[in-house]
Image (cartoon, helix red, strand yellow):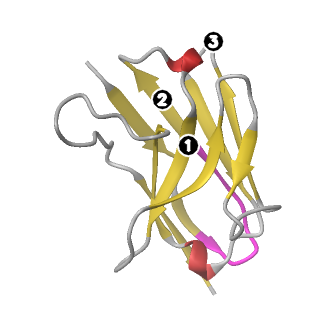
Amino acid sequence: QVQLVESGGGLVQAGGSLRLSCATSGIIFRILSMGWYRQAPGNQRELVARITSDGITNYADSVKGRFTISRDNAKDTMYLQMNSLKPEDTAVYYCNKVPPLRPGTVDYWGKGTLVTVSS
């Protein structure tokens, strides 16, 4: 059974930092390109950071230089270090395969973790 469990969100002041974690099960994590997505109120979900199976990373322009994605294949876990946070980073953050997992006819998503950045 596929499970993606995000954690580490919270309320932080602008300029602060958070580290998100994504624990996975039911997938062959080590061979997959994975990513962090986010969805702000009223907006569509967007991919903000991606890491390939061999550790190559890329980022959306909006987070480049502030966020760092990493993975631990031994633990089937992925991370997102977020520094210099801005109010516009406020969103629910989700982890998933890139492109997202689709075990049936719809994409599978975990519950996400809420990040709120106050000004």
Q: Position of residue 29 (x, y in %)?
A: 51, 19
Seen in the picture, residue 15 relative to 46 is either above or below; the reply is below
Seen in the picture, residue 101 relative to 17 is either above or below; the reply is above
- As for residue 17 lying within the magenta part, the answer is yes
Tell me which amino acid carries mark 2. Answer: Ala
Label 1 and label 2: CA atoms lie apart by 13 Å
Q: Which residue is mark 3?
A: 74
Q: Which residue is mark 1?
A: 35
Q: Nearer the viewer, mark 1 or mark 3?
A: 1
Q: Is residue 91 left or right of residue 21?
A: left
Disc 1: CA contacts within 10 A as few (<14), some (14-19) or many (>=20):
many
Q: Residue at x 63, y 39 (%)?
A: 79
Q: Is residue 52 left or right of residue 84?
A: left
Label 2 and label 3: CA atoms lie apart by 11 Å
Q: Residue at x 59, y 33 (%)?
A: 78
Q: Is residue 29 left or right of residue 61?
A: left
Report the quarter where the C terminus lies: bottom right
